[in-house]
């Protein structure tokens, strides 16, 4: 058995994301990941950046994994100055198991065009004044109305990994 790198942050099961250390980190934590799931992801991942009702959503499609939706609020991001200053944004897709070991990681630097589309939407989101908990209510409304794959209709750019 090989020693796997530990993920630096302790997280709950499910899909989470943030912009930290000058990159978007999209992380899915599950009990375990099979070799087949990993191999299918190695053959390609589509990441869709979607934007609707001032909500930024990344939808991940790849392999045998159900489409996952990741919601991002730039107003809650401690690294947003770095994000807006970057010419080209970086993204990491990371799968961790129940013991917080990294089972899969894929990284990509986005093009200037992709980065600008995302930054333009996030700049718009940054100007919206959300009342406390209003953002969470808006996200819940989107989650109740759409399956993750249905959100692709709001795609602003597609990222191939």
Image: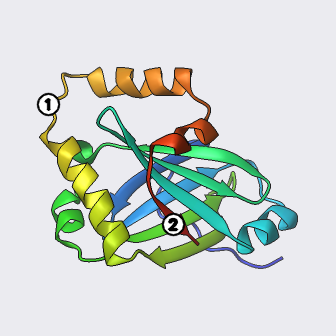
**Rendered image: mark on residue 129:** 1
Question: How many numbered badges does the structure rendering display?
Answer: 2
Mark 2 crowdedness (10 Å alpha carbons): few <14, some 14-19, many ≥20: some
| Residue 11 visible from this viewpoint | no
Q: Which residue is mark 2?
A: 159
- Residue sitting at x 52%, y 75%: 107
Tell me: 5 left or right of 107.
right
What colouring method underlies this structural image? rainbow
User: Nearest the camera: 47 or 80?
Assistant: 47
Query: Could you say which quadrant of the image residue 124 lies in?
Result: top left
Q: Is residue 132 left or right of residue 148?
A: left
Q: Percent from the top left, x then y, of residue 73? A: 30, 43
Comparing 148 with 15, the one in front is 148
- Quarter of the picture containing the N terminus is bottom right
Q: Is residue 115 above or below residue 2?
A: above
Residue 144: % across, % down = 54, 21
Indicate whether 137 appears above or below 106.
above
Residue 56 point in image, percent of width and height: 37, 44
Q: Which residue is depicted at the point 79% across and 67% down?
A: 40
Image side of residue 44 versus residue 73, left or right: right
């Amino acid at each position: 058995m090989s020693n796997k790198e530990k993920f630096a942050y302790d997280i709950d099961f499910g899909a989470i994301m943030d912009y930290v250390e000058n990159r978007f980190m999209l992380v899915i934590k599950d009990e375990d990941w099979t070799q087949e799931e990993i191999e299918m992801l190695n053959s390609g991942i589509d990441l869709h950046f979607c934007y609707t009702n001032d909500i930024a959503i990344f939808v991940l499609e790849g392999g045998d994994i159900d489409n996952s939706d990741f919601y991002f609020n730039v107003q809650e991001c401690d690294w947003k100055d770095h994000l807006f200053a970057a010419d080209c944004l970086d993204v990491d897709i990371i799968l961790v198991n129940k013991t917080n070991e990294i089972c899969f990681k894929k990284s990509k630097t986005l093009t200037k065009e992709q980065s600008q589309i995302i930054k333009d939407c996030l700049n718009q989101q940054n100007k919206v004044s959300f009342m406390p908990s209003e953002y969470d209510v808006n996200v819940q409304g989107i989650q109740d109305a759409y399956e993750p794959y249905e959100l692709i209709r709001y795609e602003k750019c597609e990222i191939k990994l």
